[in-house]
Amino acid sequence: MKFEEVLARLRAERAALVTQRAAQSTIIREVLAACDADGQRNPTEAESERSEAANTERARLDGEIAALDARLAPMETEEAAQRADEAAQQQTREVLPRGGAVVVSEARTYTEQSDPKGVRFLSDVAADFLGNRQARERLYQHEREERSLRGDQLVRAATGVTTSGAPGLVVPQYLVDLYAPKAQAGRKFADQCRHHDLPATGMTVYIPRQTTSTSADEQTSELSAVSETDYDDEMISVSVRTNAGAQTISRQAVERSLGTEDIVFEDLMKSYNSKLDDKLLNSATWGLAAVATVATWTEAAPTAAKLYSKVQEAASGVESALLDLDEGDLLTLMHGRRWAWLKAQTTTAWPFINQGVPGQAAGTDAAAAYPAGVRGHLPDGGAVVTDNHVVTNLGTGTNQDEVYLVARQEAHLWEDPKAPMFIRAEQTQAKKLGVDLVLYGYFAAIFDRVQDSSKAVHRKITGTGLVTPTFG
């Protein structure tokens, strides 16, 4: 898991604990207020027990919050240092000795301060295509700056040649960071996968699959031979795929409009991430839905409790197949409508899902918006991630969705490191006074490296229990 993802998860956990602590404080204040309203009477036995329980729980939460703070402190220090490094890189070029002299630092061509939304960058891309020499010089300067800072990782991007002979252009990293949050709603599952850096060359990546395990056993007697079984594996080939999107903008928009490039760039980023995530889930041959082991749920009167039981059955299947599944490695992936339905369900006394009030809910809602990652937790503490690329038109009534139990350690995704997306202009719209802008990148993914009865270890719950949810 990436540093940023771990930091975000710890902050989300702390926020949930703070919410729970506030709920306990509210209980204590309610008891005190009730006693004061009745003429400063002493609390009843029930009120005392309620207040003491809340105080005990609050003290426990204080301990957990303090422990999390201790874990967060060095990570937040590193985050601040990283931001300082990035700011320095954006503001200045690398200072290098040259012939005994020192090159004076210069402002970078495109920075978050001078071009916060990438309008100037994208304008230069289009203007370069139309023959603007100043724009071309700025783009070449930008490429030199990127290579000096990120080295060999950008050689392919900087030297790649398009059909029109124009070099590929690396999107400034601060723009990737800027627009990623706006596009994350499109890659919720992708962000939960186990990430690897895509190799620099080739259209295939290889990953080993273990076929024979080593062995260990009790030695039968002194000096007798110990257990020995040779380790063996096989190499699985995974195809490298290209994900790309394009937009055509008019010459009039390039030369006379304001804000067009900003809108186009954001839309390209969003579409790129959205399609990548959709493919990871729904590709007909290799996507998660295609390779996961099926757990059918036939139910005419679905309830949250019944679905939760089915989730536990599927989770048990994943653990039985992997044997060494880490507790925090398993996530439940579902469509946003299914999570909303779970939160709307009630038990005999309290909601099935609640926003972190102890003792009054089976699960908890992280109070997170769709792009925030983990939306909440099931009664066993298992993380829930919602992804609206989960299809909702399955079954005979074309109204069923699916719920997935995913082991992150076996959800492998390779993407280009540092600069996974590039932008360029193609000369195909000249007679229409148009400019084609193309955003592309390479990726590879595999979800069935480890198999259970010829299917992936991940489970998907499907069936009549997952028809369109009803509310009210």
Image (cartoon, rainbow, N blue to C red):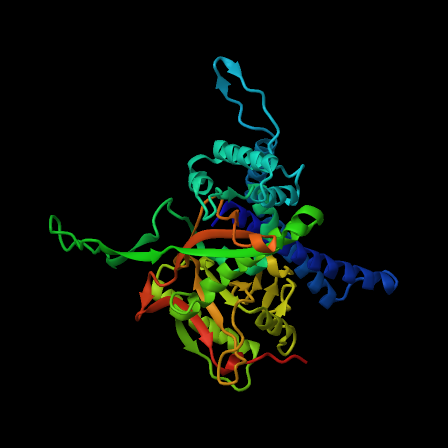
Q: Residue 304 or 349: which is nearer the viewer?
A: 304
Residue 415's x, y, as percent? 44, 50
Residue 141's x, y, as percent? 55, 33
Residue 427's x, y, as percent? 52, 50
Instruction: In the displayed orientation, state which residue is furthest to the left.
Output: 224
Residue at 64 percent across and 52 percent down: it is 59
Q: Is residue 81 left or right of residue 161?
A: right
Q: Residue 222 or 17: which is nearer the viewer?
A: 17
Instruction: In the displayed orientation, state which residue is furthest to the right.
Output: 39
- 348 lies above or below 155: below
Residue at 66 percent across and 40 percent down: it is 115
Q: Is residue 472 left or right of residue 330?
A: right
Residue 269's x, y, as percent? 57, 53
Residue at 56 percent across and 52 percent down: it is 430
Numbered disc total: 0
Instruction: Look at the image and tell me whether residue 187 can be seen.
Output: no
Q: Quadrant of the C terminus?
A: bottom right
Residue at 34 percent across and 52 percent down: it is 205
Q: Residue 253 or 328: which is nearer the viewer?
A: 253
Instruction: In the displayed orientation, state which residue is furthest to the front.
Output: 431
- 285 lies above or below 399: above
Instruction: Look at the image and tell me whether residue 134 can be seen.
Output: yes
Instruction: In the displayed orientation, state which residue is furthest to the bottom.
Output: 300
- Residue 86 occupies quadrant: top right
